[in-house]
């Protein structure tokens, strides 16, 4: 067994914090959740922005942020509004589990902290839906606590600058242990945002813009011509595959048959296209209504963190809605395509509608 590698020297990076902050002052994007220079940000706004940004682009979050905050200006307002109201307001942002977690987090803030966002990283990390990255981000950005939030973007910057071969995703935990030693004694929040911004705008996964980088002079990966190699990544473990048959009915007048998922389980509480699992030897419950169902060619593959769904989609056009015959099963309802944004439609449901040609296709981008 090889000996563990010694901890990297952080001194060059620490001594470059002034340069990094100067770059941030000149190049930071004006974003709705960022406070203007000389002002402290509202911790609730910072917390909400971190939830939203976990899987959604900055551009998308920026267009929705103020409306969302106007509806839920405080943790107490969100806790009292209820989870369904948060899900509804989250519509179109995707990855709806975050909305449920955010509501649970608001309720915990009311119950444990008098409706205020705590400043300590440990108290933040104990809140529902708040992982180590979000806890460090809120502590640093909202309260100037000396820490560095390490997500994929920041990890990429650190691993390249320090020339570390630590493979992701395990490198995240190792870098987080170094984080307090990396933060400067003053402007820790701006320093954290500077690293986030550098990873998003300059130290991109492919073709990093090194000539524009304030850390170029100390970057080990750049000096060694290894920016394409770093960060390394462990091979992803394979996910179990679950096969599903989905039934998409439309009435030719712009309405589709959708289903509200049960409150527990996969895609809990969200809206999607009616479907049933397919297992060898099982016929399942069948389509939600009698119609001339036709299978569409191909499969829609959809990845969750813990499994891969392969969906065979069947399409039917019915003359009237509701069509004659038995009523749709419980939880199933007709809805106009033009008003999908009013529903917490699961990303998978959106992809199935696109596969059937009822919505424009296009992947939902994610990340900062
Ligand atoms: S010099 Fe290039 S590789 Fe190194 S941190 Fe800057 S952008 Fe990233």
Image (tube, rainbow, N blue to C red):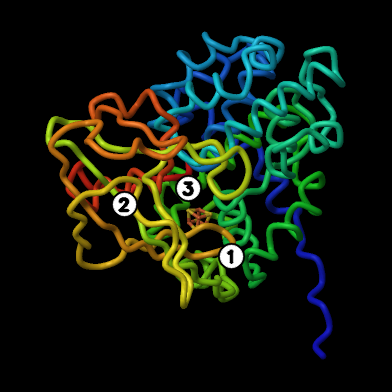
**Mark 1 = which residue?**
220
**Dot 3 and dot 1 residues touching (CB under 8 Å):** no
Residue at the location (48% across, 71% down)?
A: 279
The percent coordinates of residue 15 (x first, y second) are 71, 45
In the image, residue 62 sits, relative to residue 76, either above or below, namely below
> Which quadrant holds residue 118?
top right
Q: CA distance from mark 3 to mark 2?
A: 51 Å
Q: Secondary structure at mark 2?
A: strand
Q: Earlier in the sequence, mark 3 or mark 1?
A: 3
Disc 3: CA contacts within 10 A as few (<14), some (14-19) or many (>=20): some
Which of the two discs, 3 and 2, sits closer to the camera? Answer: 2
Q: Position of residue 240 (x, y in %)?
A: 55, 72
Q: Where does label 3 land, which residue?
A: 213
Mark 2 lies on residue: 247
Mark 2 residue crowding within 10 angstroms, few (<14) / some (14–19) / many (20+):
many
- Reply above or below: 2 against 331: below
Residue drawn at (29%, 58%), measured in percent from left and top? 313
Residue at x-position 56% and y-position 40%: 262
Q: Is 202 placed left or right of 323 in the picture? A: right
Q: Is residue 358 visible?
A: yes
């Amino acid at each position: 067994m090889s000996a563990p590698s010694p901890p990297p020297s952080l001194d060059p990076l620490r001594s470059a914090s002034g340069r990094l902050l100067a770059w941030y002052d000149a190049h930071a994007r004006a974003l709705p959740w960022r406070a203007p220079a000389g002002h402290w940000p509202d911790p609730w706004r910072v917390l909400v922005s971190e939830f939203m940004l976990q899987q959604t682009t900055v551009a998308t979050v920026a267009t929705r942020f103020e409306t969302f905050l106007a509806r839920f200006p405080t943790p107490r307002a969100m806790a009292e509004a209820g989870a369904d109201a948060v899900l509804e307001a989250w519509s179109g942002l995707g990855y709806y589990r975050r909305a449920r977690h955010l509501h649970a987090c608001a309720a915990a803030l009311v119950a444990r902290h008098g409706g205020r966002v705590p400043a300590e990283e440990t108290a933040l990390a104990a809140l529902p839906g708040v992982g180590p990255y979000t806890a460090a981000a809120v502590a640093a950005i909202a309260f100037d606590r000396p820490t560095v939030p390490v997500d994929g973007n920041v990890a990429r910057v650190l691993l390249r600058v320090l020339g570390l071969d630590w493979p992701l995703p395990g490198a995240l935990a190792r870098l987080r242990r170094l984080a307090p030693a990396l933060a400067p004694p003053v402007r820790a929040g701006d320093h954290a945002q500077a690293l986030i911004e550098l990873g998003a705008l300059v130290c991109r996964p492919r073709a990093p813009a090194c000539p524009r980088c304030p850390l170029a002079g100390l970057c080990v990966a750049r000096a060694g011509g290894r920016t394409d190699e770093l960060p390394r990544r462990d091979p992803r473990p394979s996910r179990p595959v679950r096969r599903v048959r989905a039934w998409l009915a439309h009435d030719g007048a712009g309405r589709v048959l959708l289903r509200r998922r049960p409150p527990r389980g996969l895609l809990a509480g969200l809206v999607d296209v009616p479907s049933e699992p397919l297992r060898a030897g099982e016929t399942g419950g069948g389509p939600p209504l009698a119609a001339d169902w036709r299978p569409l060619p191909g499969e829609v593959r959809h990845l969750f963190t813990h499994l891969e769904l392969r969906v065979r989609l069947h399409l039917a056009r019915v003359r009237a809605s509701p069509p004659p015959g038995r009523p749709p099963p419980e939880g199933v309802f007709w809805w106009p395509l033009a008003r999908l944004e009013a529903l917490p439609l699961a990303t998978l449901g959106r992809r199935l509608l696109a596969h059937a040609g009822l919505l424009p296709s296009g992947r939902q981008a994610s990340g900062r």
